[in-house]
Structures are given as C-alpha cells and as structure tokens.
Amino acid sequence: MIFAAGLGTRLRPLTDTVPKALIEVGGVTMLQRVINRVIASGITEIVVNVHHHADKVKEYIDSIDCPGVSIKISDESELLLDTGGGVAKAAGLLGYEEDILLHNADIYTDIDLRQMMAQHTGSGAEATLLAGNRNTSRYLLFSPGGRMTGWRNVTTQETRSPYDADTLSSSVQLAFGGIHIISPDILRLLVEASHDTPCFSITQFYISHCARLDIRAFIPAGQYNWIDIGRPQSLEQARKIASNI
C-alpha cells in the first residue's frame, strides 16, 4: 500500500495545485518512483490511498501502464483517515492472505526492499519498520535486540511506552523511515481499532501495542539514500541526487 493522501502543507504553494505524490524528482513523479520500486521487488498488487487532489492522482494512476500489476484506489476524499485508519479502510482491497508492505509516497530512497521483506519473513515479526540513525526530534525506541519498546520526543522528553523504566533505559533511539511491513494479524487489529476511531496514526498503534506484538526494526546494511521530500529544502536535495544518478 502506498500512502498518497497527504496534504503536503509544508510544500505550499506547490501543493496547492499538485498533490505531493505527483511532485517530480528527476523528471519522475514520487508516486511513480515508489510504484517502480515495489514492482521491482516482486510486488504485483498495489493499493494507493487518495485524498488531497484525489482526482489528479486517480487520473495519473489510470494513465500508468503496468502489465501484470494491479493498482487499486482506496478513496479517502470525504475524510483523511491518517495512516492507521487509511490501512483499515483499505483492508478489503489488501486482503488478509499475505504480509503487506506500506510505503509513504514522499520517501525518496534506494534501500533494498527485498532485503527488508526477507528479514521480516525470517524473523517471524508481526511488523518490521525501517529505522535508522537519522537526526529528528521524535524517535522510536528499540531494545538492543531490535524489538520496539516505545517512542520519545527528545525536544520535550515526552516518552510513550508500555514498558518499565529498566527496559527503556537500555533501549536505543532510531528514526522511523516511513516504510514498514505488517502481517494480516495486524491488519485485523487495525480494522478493529477503526471501529471506535476511524482516523488514527499507525505509529501510535505501534506504540500502544509494542509490548504484546513483535514489532522490529529493519536497519539497512551499508550506505543508502533516504529523503522525506515534504519540505522545500529536502525536495531540492532529492532532485540533486536524482540528477547525478
């Protein structure tokens, strides 16, 4: 599932007329870049959620020619559901037979998705989250063994976790990279949660459930590019990298 419903407020006025998912980097839209990468990793069934400039994203997807690949729309035009609610709404399109890769449309990266999927399958984790040592104000917390233990805002020192202080004292801080893999069991739990609150963050869901669910970090080996193009400066940075490839 590709998250393409965001408002892109930090890129205004650019996103007043163009949805963030259709912003071009190196002459290719971000949505197309993500579609290309997930197809290259072996995925043949894709769901894209839409809200901001929904019609433009739908028209763009209709124009894409991907033989042997199904691309379906989860329409959130009436209400933006955030990431957790968005996945829950798309459950009927996603199905419960296989693990699901979730990828933000605004992430420019060259990480090895196959490697991430292999780790997820091999570990038996119920969710695997791309994580790294990037500077940010909000971090996910993981045990030395890579299991998620909570969340921390290092600016305010607010910490959210179902674990005790001893567990958190040995936890490491890693930045979430906007790419994750979930099991069908987690999809079922997200659907259950949406019955009470249709609009909710999947990150908050992970924080609340990390003591009873096996949620693990995936830290790519070696050097890799990772840029959230949601700000003008980072968009320009991604465009410079793409122009040099």
Image: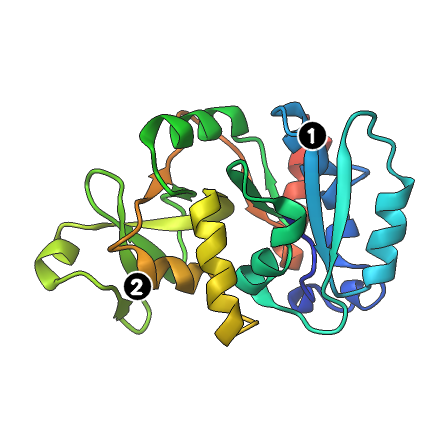
Q: At 63% across and 57% down in the image, what residue appears? A: 230
Image position, residue 203 (x, y; %) = 43, 59
Tell me, yes or no, if residue 1 can be seen here: no
Q: Is residue 239 above or below residue 201?
A: above
In this rendering, the label closer to the viewer, 2 or 1: 1
Mark pair 2, 1: CA separation: 36 Å
Q: Is residue 125 above or below residue 55?
A: above
Q: Is residue 156 above or below residue 104?
A: below
Mark 1 lies on residue: 44
Mark 2 lies on residue: 152
Pick the front one: 214 or 245: 214
Please, what secondary structure does the residue beneath circle 2 have?
A: strand
Quadrant that contains the N terminus: top right
Image position, residue 215 (x, y; %) = 33, 46
Please, what secondary structure does the residue beneath circle 1 have?
A: loop
Q: Residues within 10 Å of mark 1 (few under 14, many from 20)?
A: some
Pick the front one: 189 or 29: 189
Image position, residue 10 (x, y; %) = 65, 66
Left or right of 76? Residue 124 is left
Q: At 82% across and 54% down in the image, what residue appears? A: 57
Q: Residues within 10 Å of mark 2 (few under 14, many from 20)?
A: some
Pick the front one: 73 or 240: 73
